[in-house]
Image (spheres, coloured by chain):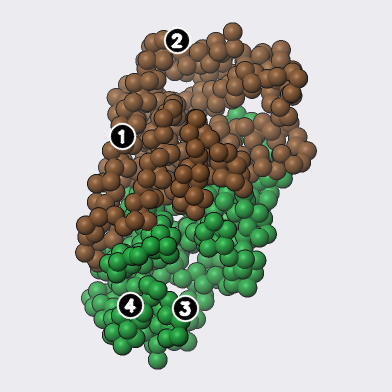
Chain colours: A green, B brown
Amino acid sequence: MSALQDTLDAKAAVVTRFLERYFSDRLALQAVNKGIQPDMKALPALPPGLETLLRCIRYSTLQEGGKRFRPALAMMTAEALGFSSDRVLAFGAAVECVHTYSLVHDDLPPMDDDDFRRGQPTNHRVFGEAFAILGGDGLLSEAFRMIAGHYRAEPVACVQAIEELSLAAGPCGMVGGQAIDLRSKTEDIQFDELQVMHRMKTGALIRASAVGAAHLCFATPGQVAQIREYASSLGLAFQVTDDLLDYDPEKPEPGSYPTLLGVDQAKSHLATLTERCLSAIESWGSRAEPLRELARYNRSRMR
Amino acid sequence: MSALQDTLDAKAAVVTRFLERYFSDRLALQAVNKGIQPDMKALPALPPGLETLLRCIRYSTLQEGGKRFRPALAMMTAEALGFSSDRVLAFGAAVECVHTYSLVHDDLPPMDDDDFRRGQPTNHRVFGEAFAILGGDGLLSEAFRMIAGHYRAEPVACVQAIEELSLAAGPCGMVGGQAIDLRSKTEDIQFDELQVMHRMKTGALIRASAVGAAHLCFATPGQVAQIREYASSLGLAFQVTDDLLDYDPEKPEPGSYPTLLGVDQAKSHLATLTERCLSAIESWGSRAEPLRELARYNRSRMR
C-alpha cells in the first residue's frame, strides 16, 4: 500500500498545484478581461463581488484534505495507456472541479445542511449561501471550459471527454443520483433503485474520470469498454467497503450494503467487484499495475 | 415589427418542441439507462426522485412565456450565414438550458428570493429548494451534453461552441456578473464595474448565443469578430432600453443607465450601440436583415 499511497499523494500534489495556478487572482483577472473583451477596457483589479467569488471557489477547491482521487485515477489511466499523466492533468482537474461543486451544493442547508467538511467550516458558513450557490455553479461551467480550452487541438477526443463528463455529472449521472437520494430519505425505495442511486451519485464521476482520460489518450473502443468496466466496478467496490467500514449493527444505515445484504454477503459482493476490476484490465500489461493495486488496496481496507 | 415578431415566435415554438422532446419521460429513462449501462440492468421506470427531478426541470424549461430569445438569436445568426436554423437548434436549446438554470438559482431565497416568475410560482416554491438547486445543476451539465452529443461529427466547431458557452456561463461571464451584482447591492460600486457587471451578467450569454452559432456554421474569424461585436452591442442595447423603460425619476434604480447617465445621455448611448450593431454586420448582405431588424426594433421600443 505504501508505494500506491506515494503514487496517489504525488499525483494529488500535482493536481493541487494546477488548480492553485488556474484559480489565482492574476489569472482570474486576465480571464475576466478576456471574457469581456473586445468591447470594454480591461479592469485594473477584480471588482469586490468577483474577488469574493474567486475566494469562495478557491476555498473549496484548495481546501486541505482533498484526496484528488478522481484526477489521480485519470492520471493512472493515462499511464496505463502509455501516456504521461500530464496528458490528462487538466481533464482530471476539471473532474475535481465538478466533484468540488457537488460537495459545496450538497452541504447547503436545503440539502444536507452540513456545517463542517474535513474539519473546516463548509463554504456557505464562510461565504454565505448565495456565494456557495454561485461558486458551485461557476466551478461546473469552468470545468467544461478547462477541458475545451486545454484539448481543443485534439477535438475528437476533447468532445468525447466532455460528453462523458457531462453525462456523468448531470441528471443521468451524479445529479440524478442525488435526486434519488433526496427522495429515498422520505420514501420507501426498492433495492434496484438504491443500486442505481449509488451508481449514479458517486459511481458516474469515478467512471468518467477513467473513461474520459482513456478517450484523451486515444484508447481503442475495446480499451474504453475495459476501463469503463474497471472503473464502474471500482466505484461500487469503494462504496461497499465504505459501507462495511461504517456499519454499526446497533444503528444500521438504511440503504447501505451490509444492511441490505448482510455483512457476509456484502463482503462476498466486494470480492466479486474486485475480481471484476482485475479481469477487466487483465490484458493491459504491467503499466496497469497501479490500477490493479488500487482495486486490491480497496479490498484490503476490510481486513 | 410584426414580421420580426412572427420570426421570433416561430423560432420560439421550434425550440420549445425540441426541449419538450428532449426532456420527455421516455427519453429521460433511456438516457438514464444509457448512463448506468453496461453494468446494471435497465430500469423499467424512473425512480421517484428522478421523476421529480425531471418534472422540476420540465417545469422551468417549458414554463409558459419563455421568449427563447437566445436560441432565436442563434438561429437568426445561422440563417444570416446561409445555413438552416435547424443547424443550431440543439445549440440554441442548450443556451436556453443555461439561461433557465440561472433563473431557477437566481430565484432561490438566498439569492433574489422571488416567489413568482412569469406569473407562476418559482421552481423552489413548487419543488422545494433542494430540487431547485439540483434541477439547475442538472440543466447546466445537460446543456454541455446536448452540444457534445449533437455536434460531435463536427468536433472543431463543437469544441469552439462549448468553449464560448462555458466561458460565457462561468465566473468570467454570467456567474461572475451575478457575483458582482450581489456585492453591488450592499457596497459602493464604480461605474466601470457596473458596466462590466451588465456585460457579464446578461451580455455574455447573448453574445455566446450568436458567436457559438457562428462557430457551428463554420464562420471565418472575421465573421466571428463581426457577430461578436454585433451581439455584444445588442446585449448592452437591450439593457439600456430596459433600464429606460423601467426608469422612474421618483425612484431611480441605483446602477441603471438613466440614473447614472441621465435620460438624454442614456438615449444617445442607445443610439450609438444600435449603430454599432448595424455597422458590425454591414457586409453580411440581405440574409442578415432580420439581425439588423432586431437592433432597430430594440431602439424603437423607446419611441
Residue A116 figure quarter: bottom right
Q: Are marks 2 and 3 on the same chain?
A: no
Please tell me whether mark 2 sits on a helix, a strand or a loop: loop
- Look at label 3 and name its amino acid: Thr
Which label is found at residue B65? Answer: none
User: How far apart are the two marked residues, 1 and 3, measured between alpha carbons?
Assistant: 47 Å
Which label is found at residue A260? Answer: 4
Q: Residue at x 40, y 25 (%)?
A: B72
Is the C-beta separation of discs 1 and 4 under 8 Å? no
Q: Are marks 1 and 4 on the same chain?
A: no
- Between circles 1 and 4, the one closer to the viewer is 4
Is the C-beta separation of discs 1 and 3 under 8 Å? no
- Look at label 1 and name its amino acid: Phe
Is the C-beta separation of discs 2 and 3 under 8 Å? no
Q: Name the spot of residue A222 as percent of width and height, x first.
A: 21, 64
User: How far apart are the two marked residues, 2 and 3, measured between alpha carbons?
Assistant: 65 Å
The residue carrying mark 1 is B18
Chain to which the residue tagged by mark 4 belongs: A
Q: Are marks 1 and 2 on the same chain?
A: yes
User: How far apart are the two marked residues, 1 and 2, measured between alpha carbons?
Assistant: 26 Å
- Between circles 4 and 2, the one closer to the viewer is 4
Which label is found at residue B1? Answer: 2
Residue A37 figure quarter: top right
Farthest residue, direction top: B303
- Quadrant location of the C terminus of chain A? bottom left
The residue carrying mark 3 is A7
Q: Looking at this view, is B52 or A302 the one in front?
A: B52
